[in-house]
Image: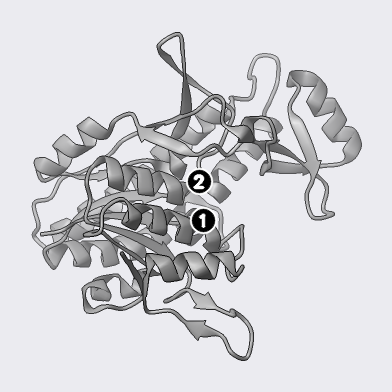
């Protein structure tokens, strides 16, 4: 039995309809695939994204803000969406396991992820979050708490925050004990709540962790055999969108790094997934990373998707 960390994207959960009922339905479809994978003899820890969800929550916070009902800070909003998406997954997986007569408990964990307070991204935040503002509105918002706003693709101004590199999963020992006890944990949602150390205390910060890098750190911390990153396509491609595009099947770390250097992967989509996969495999030659669609999850042992080996 292999231990697999599965990273499920937030965009895969919120497709078009942002209501909770619609997202629950989408999560139920994902849970069906994950439960079937577990029924085949695999052990799983799930990590999920929250980009669209936390963005919508920040908009709700701003719309409802008043003196008596102040908007909550980003670290709290990340934790809130960890809880809501974790609940949807927990509920759906519990129902699937019941249908399959598998007595597997599922537990969601609000997870803290340690980052370095000296990470360069804190000096140059680039991760846009929340609603769009006019320049005048952005200047007013900036006066409230010295937030940084930047123009986003000509559509207006958005608040930008740091996206530091995850260093350690604070709850890793608890997660390991759950795995050893036969529990399926859902953790590091949205990349986890970023925290720094201040005077030996953990303090939440205004930042967003990359879900794929947090999944890599999680997989390393709990000594997983495989990191499975689920995305919208069956394989990753070189020369994507061109006449000579080529789907990658099994590639080595060296080949992946060559393709990265050649600029084949977009910074905002596939690049962080491949970098996280490469970092995980480089840590131990026995490890494997797979990037594919959730429809292919049950077949990863047969070599489907893009499989990255040492």
Residue at 61% over, 58% down: 267
Q: Single out the residue that lies furthest toward the right.
A: 136
Q: Is residue 65 above or below residue 250?
A: above
Q: Secondary structure at mark 2?
A: loop
Answer yes or no: is residue 188 visible: yes
Residue under circle 1? 272
Who is closer to the viewer here, 171 or 237?
237
Applied colour scheme: one colour
Residue at 31% over, 78% down: 304
225 left or right of 62? left
Which quadrant of the structure image shows residue 307?
bottom left
Residue at 33% over, 29% down: 170
Quadrant of the drawing holding the N terminus? bottom left
Where does residue 59 sit, x and y in percent of width and height?
66, 39
**Tag shown at residue 210:** 2
Residue at 22% over, 62% down: 35
Where does residue 81 sit, x and y in percent of width and height?
47, 39
Where does residue 214 sit, x and y in percent of width and height?
41, 44
Where does residue 113 sit, x and y in percent of width and height?
41, 32
Q: Secondary structure at mark 1?
A: helix
Quadrant of the drawing holding the C terminus? bottom left
């Amino acid at each position: 039995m292999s231990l697999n960390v599965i990273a499920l994207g937030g965009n895969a959960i919120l497709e078009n309809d942002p209501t909770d009922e619609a997202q629950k339905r989408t999560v139920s479809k994902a849970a069906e695939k994950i439960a079937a994978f577990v029924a085949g003899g695999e052990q799983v820890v799930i990590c999920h994204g929250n980009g669209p969800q936390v963005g919508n929550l920040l908009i709700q916070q701003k719309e409802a803000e008043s003196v008596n009902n102040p908007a909550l800070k980003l670290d709290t909003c990340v934790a809130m969406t960890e809880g809501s998406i974790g609940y949807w997954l927990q509920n759906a997986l519990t129902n699937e396991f019941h249908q399959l007569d598998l007595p597997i408990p599922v537990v969601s964990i609000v997870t803290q992820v340690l980052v370095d307070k000296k990470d360069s991204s804190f000096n140059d935040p680039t991760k846009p979050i929340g609603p769009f503002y006019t320049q005048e509105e952005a200047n007013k918002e900036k006066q409230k708490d010295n937030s940084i706003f930047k123009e986003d693709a000509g559509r207006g101004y958005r608040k930008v925050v740091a996206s530091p590199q995850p260093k350690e999963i604070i709850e890793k020992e608890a997660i390991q004990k759950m795995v050893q006890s036969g529990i399926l944990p859902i953790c590091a949602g949205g990349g986890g709540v970023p925290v720094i150390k201040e005077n030996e205390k953990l303090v939440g910060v205004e930042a967003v962790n990359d879900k794929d890098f947090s999944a890599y750190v999680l997989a390393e911390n709990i000594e997983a055999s495989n990191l499975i990153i689920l995305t919208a396509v069956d394989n990753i491609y070189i020369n994507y969108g061109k006449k000579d595009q080529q789907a990658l099947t099994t590639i080595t770390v060296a080949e992946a790094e060559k393709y990265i250097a050649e600029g084949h992967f977009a910074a905002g989509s596939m690049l962080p997934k491949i970098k996280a996969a490469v970092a995980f495999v480089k840590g131990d030659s026995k490890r494997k990373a797979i990037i594919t669609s959730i429809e292919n999850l049950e077949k990863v042992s047969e070599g489907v998707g893009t499989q990255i080996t040492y």
